[in-house]
RNA sequence: GGCAUUGUGGCCGAGUGGCUAGGCAGAGCUCUGCAAAAGCUUGUACAGCGGUUCGAAUCCGCUCGAUGCCUCCA
């Protein structure tokens, strides 16, 4: 018996614009593809939010007992600066600017990407394929689309014929656009453009002689178009039709629209059952952009080396902050908001630690099973993590009251509570308890225990000068003493 | 300019046509040698203007603002 048989999940499908009952193609199995980063610079914090949302989704699916194949690609070629003929490959451009081999650029920023994600406690995807590793598959797809007459070759490049495709299929259904409107709204493009229509997009681009990143193809040396890799890799690893395709909201158009077109042109049917889009992250209410300086890198948050925030924030605090918003809402990052989240996060962690030493009784003063189901209900409602967190704080309240003997819990309920708290906080939200790792040092906690004892002796003798000194000195070292009914405890602040 | 999304109390952020999540901050109280921690109590907010309705923050229209896409972008 798997959890997913009892927990009925609804997901918001961007394609239909509605929350739908989630039903995988094959019971118990889920195929999920998420558009990964183009590794031409340090990973963007907003990018992290998107991947974090899908990490949480991945985690919840696994928790429910699904066998998930999660594919998240690395774009290491083909992502053009723009769609005009002069468009340069982002990685090639960076390589030129920094005088590096393109694959050095790819390696450098892939490593950065993985390092940051690890700090955020991401689970690795099942497969992390690269565009350059799937050139052959991409060429095969182009051949098929050409054979079906939905693409055309010109001067060694191949373009997808959007207008022709639109006669039998519906281009724009994901982003709610109509081709006619798009055509009428198009600005005049440069005259030298090879494309028949501005809406057409490149499947294959001819490499100019100086272009380093090039592969042989039936149309001459070149490189694949950006949208194509996702179709190639998702089809290869998840099949012609799979359950979930995710990515950032900004990829909806044109990237995902083009993916749908390619897959439908190639395979004759829709590639994806549920499209999911994570929303944007803003900084101080404005779009993050390097050009305006309204930008912050993940490691600048962790180290505190930035002009925007008052202090450093741990990856888990940032993760908690992001999980306090629904993945589908715009989230605004600010110092004030992070500060509030960090405090809330510490409160949650303290309660988690207190859970281990709670007294049990013959009756429970609150309904643990009902509470647990409420947590699942929140997650089942399109992964509503803010609601889940609200319920976790409800548990915090009960935990603290039980600790103060103002409420009670049975041993059995306590086990259920512990298990559920662990599942939701660590397995599903993917948070980490910093205190727990610090406490692994038994000697340190013994030493603090000794200081607590000395302080309490001093207090018993009314030597408050000494007791306060111990307390204050520890405080400055980041160790907070907490006097409770049953003695003194401590935590790392 | 076009298309889309969105606008909730000091800050962040859920949400349902009628019974007002949650976190942080603030205030009061309990506890404490004093604090801190913890607990309890306290806030009737929903951009503006109209409309539908017995009743709307929740539905519709307009206005204003923000964000995204429209050229690369999670």
Image (cartoon, helix red, strand yellow):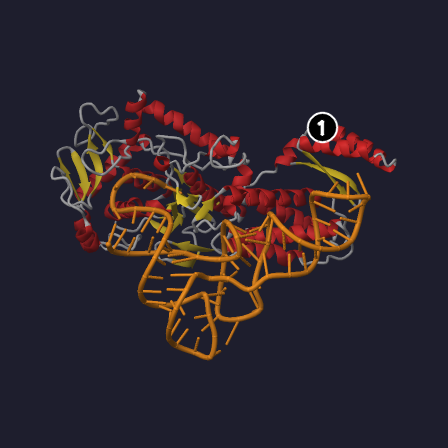
Is residue A102 something one can see in this rendering? yes
Q: Position of residue A299 (x, y in %)?
A: 48, 31
**Quadrant showing the C terminus of chain A:** top right
Relative image position of residue A476 (x, y in whole percent): 67, 31
Whether residue A1 appears in this view of the structure is: no
Q: Residues within 10 Å of mark 1 (few under 14, many from 20)?
A: few
Give whichever of A343, A263 is nearer the camera.
A343
Q: Is residue A420 left or right of residue A471?
A: left
Q: Is residue B63 left or right of residue A439?
A: left
Point out residue B27 in the picture as x, y percentages from the top left corner: 66, 53
Residue, disc 1: A444
Q: In the displayed structure, does residue B17 sit left or right of residue A345?
A: left
Q: Quadrant of residue A215?
A: top left
Q: Secondary structure at mark 1?
A: helix
In this rendered view, identify the residue nearer to me: B72 or A356. B72
Q: Nearer the viewer, residue A207 or A315?
A: A315
């Amino acid at each position: 018996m798997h959890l997913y048989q009892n927990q009925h999940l609804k997901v918001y499908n961007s394609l239909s614009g509605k929350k739908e009952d989630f039903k995988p193609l094959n019971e118990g199995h889920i195929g999920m593809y998420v558009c990964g980063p183009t590794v031409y610079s340090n990973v963007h914090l907003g990018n992290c939010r998107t991947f974090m949302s899908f990490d949480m989704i991945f985690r919840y699916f696994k928790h429910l007992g699904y066998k998930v194949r999660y594919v998240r690609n690395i774009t290491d070629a083909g992502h053009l600066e723009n769609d005009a003929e002069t468009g340069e490959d982002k990685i090639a451009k960076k390589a030129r600017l920094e005088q590096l081999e393109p694959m050095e650029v790819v390696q450098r920023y892939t490593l950065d990407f993985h390092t940051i994600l690890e700090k955020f406690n991401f689970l690795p995807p099942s497969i992390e394929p690269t565009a350059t590793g799937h050139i052959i598959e991409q060429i095969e797809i182009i051949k098929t689309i050409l054979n079906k007459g939905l693409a055309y070759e010109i001067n060694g490049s191949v373009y997808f014929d959007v207008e022709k495709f639109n006669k039998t299929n519906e281009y724009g259904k994901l982003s709610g656009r109509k081709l006619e409107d798009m055509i009428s709204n198009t600005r005049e493009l440069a005259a030298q453009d090879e494309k028949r229509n501005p809406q057409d997009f490149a499947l294959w681009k001819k490499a100019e002689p100086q272009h380093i990143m090039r592969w042989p193809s039936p149309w001459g040396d070149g490189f694949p178009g950006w949208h194509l890799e996702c179709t190639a890799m998702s089809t290869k690893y998840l099949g012609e039709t799979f359950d979930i395709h995710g990515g950032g909201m900004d990829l909806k158009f044109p990237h995902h629209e083009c993916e749908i077109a390619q897959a439908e042109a190639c395979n004759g049917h829709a590639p994806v059952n549920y499209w999911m889009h994570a929303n944007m992250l803003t900084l101080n209410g404005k779009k993050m952009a390097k050009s305006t300086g309204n930008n912050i890198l993940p490691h600048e948050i962790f180290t505190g080396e930035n002009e925007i925030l008052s202090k450093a924030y741990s990856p888990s605090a940032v993760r908690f902050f992001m999980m306090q918003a629904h993945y589908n809402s715009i989230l605004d990052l600010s110092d004030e908001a992070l500060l509030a989240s960090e405090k809330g996060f510490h409160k949650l962690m303290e309660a988690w630690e207190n859970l281990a030493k709670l007294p049990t009784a013959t009756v429970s003063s609150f309904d643990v099973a009902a509470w647990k189901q409420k947590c699942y209900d929140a997650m089942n409602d399109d992964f509503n993590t803010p609601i889940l967190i609200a319920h976790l704080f409800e548990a915090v309240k009960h935990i603290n009251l039980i600790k103060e003997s103002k409420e009670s819990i049975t041993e059995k309920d306590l086990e259920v509570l512990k298990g559920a708290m662990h599942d939701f906080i660590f397995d599903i939200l993917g948070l980490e308890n910093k205190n727990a790792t610090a406490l692994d040092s038994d000697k340190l906690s013994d030493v603090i225990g000794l200081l607590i004892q000395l302080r309490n002796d001093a207090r018993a003798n009314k030597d408050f000068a000494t007791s306060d000194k111990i307390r204050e000195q520890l405080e400055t070292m980041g160790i907070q003493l907490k006097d409770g009914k049953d003695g003194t405890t401590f935590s790392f602040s």
